[in-house]
Image (tube, rainbow, N blue to C red):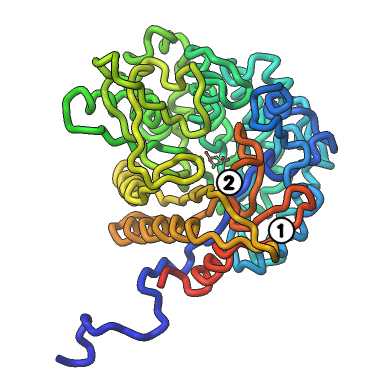
Amino acid sequence: MTTTDPTIVSHSSAPRVAFPPAFHWGTATAAYQIEGAADDGRTPSIWDVFSHTPGKVVNGDTGDIAVDHYHRFREDVRMMADLGLTSYRFSLSWSRIQPTGRGPAVERGLDFYRALVDALLEHGISPVATLYHWDLPQELEQAGGWPVRETAYRFAEYAAHAARALGDRVPVWTTLNEPWCSAFLGYGSGVHAPGRTDPADALKAAHHLNLGHGLAVGALREILPASAQLAVSLNLHMVRPLTDSAEDLEAARRIEAVGNRIWTGPMFNGGYPADLKADTASFVDWDELVRPGDEAEIGRPIDLLGLNYYNPTIVSAPQKDSEAPEPARNDGHGNSPYSPWPGSEDVVFHLANEDVTAMNWSIDASGLSDSLIGMHHDFGLPLMVTENGAAFEDVVGPDGTVDDPERIRYVRLHLAAVADAIAAGADVRGYYLWSLMDNFEWAYGYSKRFGIVHVDFETQRRTPKSSAHWYTEVIRRGGLD
Ligand code: FCB
């Protein structure tokens, strides 16, 4: 046996699970979840109105102050630099940039993002800007919201304002964050703003979000330098049938259609799939909703595809035994009596396993590698994991620190899954841990903590958790050990 035998364990410092040298190591946030300064230069978005409506958010929490990032962004960027992050994904607040959702942009709002991006660049952190992370200007909701076609055109106009102001310094742009949530939690189950519960409106919203994405890509291409990379962040569900019975496979097909292919069909495969249209025909007339040319507009080429992944989605056929207790539907961000799955309301959802986070989301990293490999195979685009992370019941020690081995375990498993996908040929360019710091977790308010940095919501003090220190080491080594 010679010393070059590959079975000999190497004691060099080279990471065992290495990532490409240019891999982006990031964290992700969203404007409404962190900025605060709700009445400082911006008008209400649907999330201001929703969170101020009694009964909509746990404890009546709102994003009025959130973690005051609007005033503390310089400190936050320094903290990111100290953690060694090489990239940062954040979202722009539409109503800070274009308060009524129409007309001219407001320089004050743009100046905030110019200053944020400049601070990131000064620290060598590459910015990724998301144009829409769920905070539609309330005026546009009053004019009909996403179920109305006009909103797609307004979105493209706002995108153009943002691109003109920030295009010289933001290299990567994401149009929409998880449009499934905007359409089906916002207008279907109603657990998210604006809290409407009409399946037809949810499907119309989905089409207009798609159209807004396509129109925005067109507008951005005209303004941004040729080097700019355009993306969308989808929470494609890793749908798995509970058994391989024909009925469970059919349930999986239905959820895959209205959860995933409703986006990827027109974005990458030339149009809405026939089975989706058939499943939902009792709610919308697709021939009327989708006008000639819409699908081509939605299918404008993009450069990167973002995946937000937290857990797999296990489904089975509707239960025949009415005596059996109905398993809770797992809609991710909270349940309501209204289904976010139009046309497939009876499909039954299951936990993948009992190893769950504080959101009751099963931990199963195989769904991440399978998703990335599947997306690579199906769409052939470079990929980014634009969100992945976990909430746990963090315990703050007497010295204010948080030891969170469960979060480290979660991230380690999922980074290993990313490495597996890369090894299998997927071109994954970056990983954005959700989230940089504890923040306003939508309908759960401040009760769920996803940060690798602990925030004391009374004092706004930031303290990196052990997961943050661990992530710093991963970044330093360029991979897992
Ligand atoms: C995603 C959202 C993000 C956060 C995480 C936990 O669906 O995009 O804002 O809520 O879930």
Q: Is residue 149 above or below residue 447?
A: above
Location of residue 204 in the rendering, given as x and y in whole percent from the top left corner: 51, 17
Sequence-wise, the earlier of marks 1 and 2 is 2
Disc 1 versus disc 2: distance between alpha carbons? 28 Å
Q: Residue at x 47, y 34 (%)?
A: 332
Helix, strand or loop under label 1: strand
Location of residue 358 in the rendering, given as x and y in whole percent from the top left corner: 51, 44
Q: Which mark is residue 100?
A: none
Q: Is residue 92 above or below residue 168?
A: above
Q: Which mark is residue 462?
A: 1
Amino acid type, label 2:
Trp
On screen, residue 29 versus residue 308, left or right, reads right
Image quadrant in which the C terminus is located: bottom left
Q: Write down the quadrant of residue 12 in the picture.
A: bottom left
Q: How many other residues sit within 10 Å of disc 2, few (<14), some (14-19) or many (≥20)?
A: many
**Residue at disc 1, CB closer than 8 Å to ligand 1:** no
On screen, residue 140 versus residue 372, left or right, reads right
Helix, strand or loop under label 2: strand
Q: Residue at x 22, y 92 (%)?
A: 3
